[in-house]
Image (tube, grey):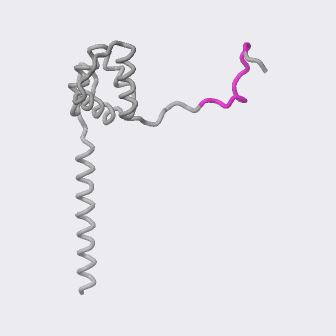
Amino acid sequence: MVKSTVKQLGLVVTILFAVKANAVIAADFQAYPIDKSSGLVMAPGWEAVKGNCTACHSAKFITGQRGDRETWQSMIRWMQSTQGLWQIPSETESTILDYLATNYPPNKSSRRSNLPINLMPTAPNRYP
């Protein structure tokens, strides 16, 4: 009888843990609507992205890109050094980078890998 009760208690604890874990996962994965005018995910920080980024280029430049925080930051630095992007206050830049890295993270490429050189067609200007 005691073994049976302990087993049942263990099962109840396991079920409660699984329910709690799923609730945490569900809370972390929240579907946000898409802004109709820009196409941006309306997650926390999207207004900062829309206000700063779409002042110079289309939001499609953002939605068509993927990157981690460092990749997005390097794009911002490139725009600052070559395209005249203003210095973004550090708190705003952090909000922008959090938003971009969370909502437009790197993903697996749908491109196939390059063909090996021995399978490439012979080009007229290629030397043997």
The image position of residue 33, as x and y in percent, is 23, 31
Residue located farthest toward the right when viewing the structure as drawn: 128
Q: Residue at x 23, y 53 (%)?
A: 23
Residue 28 lies, with reference to residue 4, above or below; the image says: above
**In-image side of 40 versus 111 (left or right):** left
Report x, y in % for residue 5: 23, 80
Q: If the image is split into quadrants, where does the N terminus sit?
A: bottom left
- State the image quarter where residue 106 is shown: top left
Residue drawn at point x = 33 percent, y = 34 percent: 101
Residue 76: give x, y in percent of width and height.
35, 23
Magenta span contains residue 68: no
Residue shown at 22%/20% (left/top)? 51
Compared to 115, does 27 lie above or below?
A: below
> Quarter-wise, where is residue 60 in the image?
top left
Majority secondary structure in the magenta region: loop
For this rendering, which residue is in front, 103 or 111?
103
Write down the quadrant of residue 48 in the picture. Answer: top left
Quadrant where the image shows the C terminus: top right
Depth order, front residue of 121/51: 51
> Is 118 covered by the magenta stretch?
yes
Extreme-bottom residue of the structure: 1
In the displayed structure, would residue 14 be above or below residue 25? below
In the image, the segment drawn in magenta is 114-125
Closer to us: 100 or 32: 100
In this rendering, position of residue 24 left or right of residue 119 = left
Rendering coords of residue 127 (x, y %): 76, 18
